[in-house]
Amino acid sequence: DAEGEAETPGAADPSAILGTDRVADPVRATRHARRVREEAIGAAAERFYAEPPQIERGWGALLIDTQGRAYVDLVNNVTAIGHAHPVFADRIARQLHLLNTNSRFLYDAFAEFTARLVAHSPDPSLDTVIPVNSGSEAVDLALTLARVATGRRDVIAVRESYHGWTSAADAVSTSAFDNPHAADSRPDWVHLVDAPNAYRGRHRGPDAGAAYAREVADLARSLADEGRPAGAFICEPVLGNAGGVIPPAGYLTAVADAVRAHGGLVIADEVQVGYGRLGSSFWGSTMQGLVPDIVSVAKAAGNAYPLGAVITRREIVDALAREGTFFSSAGGTPASAVAGSAILDIIDAEGLQQNAARVGGIIAEEVRALMPRHPLIGAVHGTGLYLGIELVRDRETLEPAREEATRVCDLLLGHGFIVQAASERQNVLKVKPPLVLTEVDARRFVAALDAVLGALRD
Ligand code: PLP
């Protein structure tokens, strides 16, 4: 769509950005990638769409398939700065030509990235960054740090959460959607509390936050009474897998107080929500008034380049360092460190957090305005460009409109919008695009959603 393309920041001629001089053999590479995907993860891809598009290239918030069709990418929370950002690509390429090595050596790129991330840290007390390669690894390391620093093994985690597929991250993940086997193998050190969802769930209304927090406080106390106080509480500051639900105000700070009262630490998993996506704040924890002890980041941190990090206090890292060597061979290599710095520079220079607030605000407001006409829309969760449009068959019973959500995604694909129906109940349209999404594309998305919901009703 020429209108949408022209509006995308940084959008020039895509072939100028992704020309054959940059990629050795893009056609062969794409064919190979397609074959690998068909053989290995075809079933997973088809989970979302009857006919998943075969994506070949992208720029800004657009993805272009092998037929040359352009889609607005509304699901790619892995990218903050958008696809094929030329500054990002050039800076990594320059570093790759110069040096890329085991992160054991000293090089400026490492110091620069860690300093840049500390400068964005949720709190001055969180002054130490350990780069890793993914969100799962960041969560595993965060749990290890908390358990070593406190000398305790028990962890309190929130149901309906996904924190990764490495062993400790998997243990604290409860999402049936992402890991159907987690419950069978849950280790005894994991203790689960309900997702603080005031829209659906056991506690609703204005007192829901206090009621959910009381459950965590009771659990923290009973674990302490049993002589096994929790070393950590881990939570996404905005509940990603539960559908982009913002915990009730005061919940996280009350929980942090309760866990800390028994000597535990608070881990904020910012892998999805951090890096400006929420618009009003760079971090979910800041938005909730929480100063965590340990933060895990990834996804946007690397813009799909493998980079994650843990941000924490020096003394927490020192506690682990005293136990012996700990080290990630490829965490924060020169190229990934340059990627990490470039992303932070671009988010700041292009005002992408502000764009998330503005464009996300337009989507939320306009979708809410559709609610009188489309009873299928039960609620719009989230904020900024981290939204969950929850579809229900009945606004009283909140029966999840799961099949309808899948159908809506398929129809939206026909309109050129890539959206996924996810959440534990798979009835939430997740809107988490690159933060470069334009107002034009945002309004076109709402118009397409209006048309699709209308077609579904008729
Ligand atoms: N934490 C959260 C909140 C996530 O959403 C994810 C991935 O979806 C992870 C951790 C794991 O990150 P990765 O896929 O980079 O291992």
Image: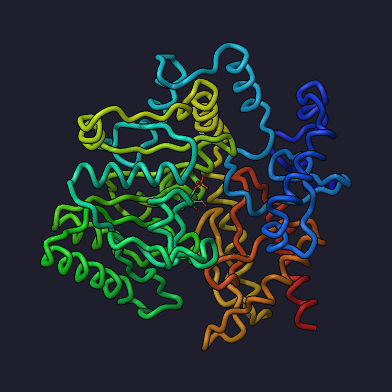
In percent of width and height, residue 39 lies at 74, 50
Of 226 and 222, nearer the camera is 226
Q: What is the residue that sits farthest to the right in this orientation?
A: 67
- Classify 79 as above or below 401: above
Can you say whether 45 is above or below 68 in the image?
Answer: below
Give the percent coordinates (x, y) of residue 83.
Answer: 68, 38
> Is residue 144 or residue 366 the one in the foreground?
144
Q: Nearer the viewer, residue 27 or 378?
A: 27
* Position in image of residue 184 (x %, y %): 43, 67
Quadrant in which the C terminus appears: bottom right
**Left of 154 or right of it: where is 203?**
right
Instruction: State which quadrant residue 81 falls in.
Output: top right
Name the residue located 63 percent from the left edge and 43 percent from the top edge: 436
Point 77% across, 78% down: residue: 456
Lateral position of residue 199 relative to residue 234, left or right = right
Q: Image quarter for residue 248?
A: bottom left
Vertically, is 170 above or below 55? below
| Image-based side of 5 in relation to 95, left or right | right
Q: Residue at x 29, y 61 (%)?
A: 156
Q: Is residue 391 left or right of residue 13?
A: left
In percent of width and height, residue 267 lies at: 32, 50
Instruction: Count all numbered tags in the image, as a single digit.
Output: 0
Q: Residue at x 39, y 57 (%)?
A: 171
